[in-house]
Amino acid sequence: MRVTVIDYKAGNLTSVLKALRHLGAEAEVTDGDFAPVESAERIVLPGVGHFQATERLDVTGLTRAIRAAIARGVPFLGICVGMQWLYSGSTEARQQAGLGHFTEACTRFPDAGEKVPHVGWNSLEARAGSLLLAGVDAGEFVYFTHSYKAPVTTDAAAITHYIEPFAAAVERANVMGVQFHPEKSGTTGLKILGNFLAWEGN
Amino acid sequence: MLTKRIIACLDVHAGRVVKGVQFVDIVDAGDPAALAARHAREGADEIVLLDITATHEGRQTLFDTVRRTALALFVPFTVGGGIRSADDAAQVFEAGADKVSVNSAAIADPALIEAIGRSFGAQAVIVAIDARRDHEAADPIRDAQVFVQGGRKPTGRRVVEWAREAEARGAGEILLTSMDSDGMRTGFDCELTAAVSEAVSIPVIASGGAGTVDHFVDVFGRGKADAALAASIFHFGVSSARSLKEELARAGVSVRLPC
């Protein structure tokens, strides 16, 4: 199986590529050329750091190519900031629009005397019927590191609690996102990435 | 619920894992890649590889060791030792590290924290602080003195103000080693850890002094640590992260189990 991984200069791709290849995927990287996106079988958009970095997706034309691929039904997985980008935007960079596939916006954890960022292993409550989280039992742990998060909506595929409940994963048909890092989440993370690679739709 | 992390630390010298007792008297304990894989399999939440002699001898981190260790490791992996520039950090990330830990170089040039964070994100930058209580200071704990070069050289910096500056410059986590406790197996310095943890909003990883399960219970409670680092307790078959975490869970500490 072939996976197109998008490099928009937001952090390090090594771990994501290593995990995908470990699972038997043939992973190719594109950092601006959108031709690979036009012929992609599956797309992964990783990303750590600041939401503003997603501006590069607009500048390079990748946003338009990704939108078209999603419309064709190509399975898409956004990781961390890559998930947040699926929403209308983030209060981290208000002038930078997201893809808007999900209409809500991402916001910072409220100040509640708890540490922000949320860093470490936290548990998932997966929605029944999620294909991305198939086989993930209630309470399985995954690794998070983030200060901004997506709200809980009907598209949430998993909920995690930190200060307040947030969407740890989102899934609507072929468009999926995870706030945590499956490539760093041990056997649970590899299972989730494996589900994405095996995704063939309903 | 967010859990307390148990981080296995591999102190590496010349490509082999060693563990210092107050930074001297090193004993060979094995191959880094094999030990990292074993710790991950046995329930460690993260792996840290510290090249303990890199700064002192002016050597670069051993990229081959990092690459070999990262290859089949699917938990967060931090590398420290000898990282002096954003380019050094980039090479370590390219070899497969998820985070880098900077210590002496960040003291010498605090802008290094921002430089690495700009390219790789704040979450990827751990500022390691080695501190020793200063009994001549007004507050021996908050004003504990920061040392560099593997604990050889005092800097005149004070632990709380340096931790705050590191956070302001974009550090993602603080790795705090108590030089008074390190290698003694008599417990973490909970007062020192709590003083730093309360002063910043980023996670604090406590290091130095682990010898028993109760020491971990203490540092997660009284010490307000978000994570704890341990090396010697894991080596030589004394314990595993999993058995440690099972005992912590029985003592009421929230940890990742099963793992």
Image: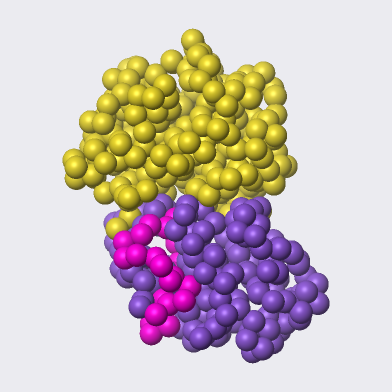
Which residue does the image show at 43% across and 83% down from the upper left?
A155
Chain letter for the yellow colouring in the rendering? B
Which range of residues does the magenta coloring cover? A129-157
Q: Please say whether residue A155 is one of the residues in the magenta stretch.
A: yes
Q: Of all residues shown, which one is farthest toward the left?
A: B251
Which residue does the image show at 70% across and 34% down from the upper left?
B64
Which is the main secondary structure of the residues drawn in magenta?
Answer: loop
Front-lying residue, B105 or B230: B230
Which residue does the image show at 35% across and 78% down from the upper left?
A128
Which residue does the image show at 70% across and 69% down from the upper left?
A2
Q: Position of residue B43 (x, y in %)?
A: 39, 42
Residue B82 visible in the snapshot: yes
Q: Position of residue A129 (x, y in %)?
A: 39, 80
Front-lying residue, B175 or B229: B229
Q: Position of residue A24 (x, y in %)?
A: 65, 60
Determine whether B201 is above or below B58 in the image: below
Q: Position of residue B24 (x, y in %)?
A: 49, 12
**In screen coordinates, is A172 left or right of A14?**
left
Residue B84 visible in the snapshot: no
Which quarter of the picture shows residue B176? Answer: top left
Chain letter for the purple colouring in the rendering? A
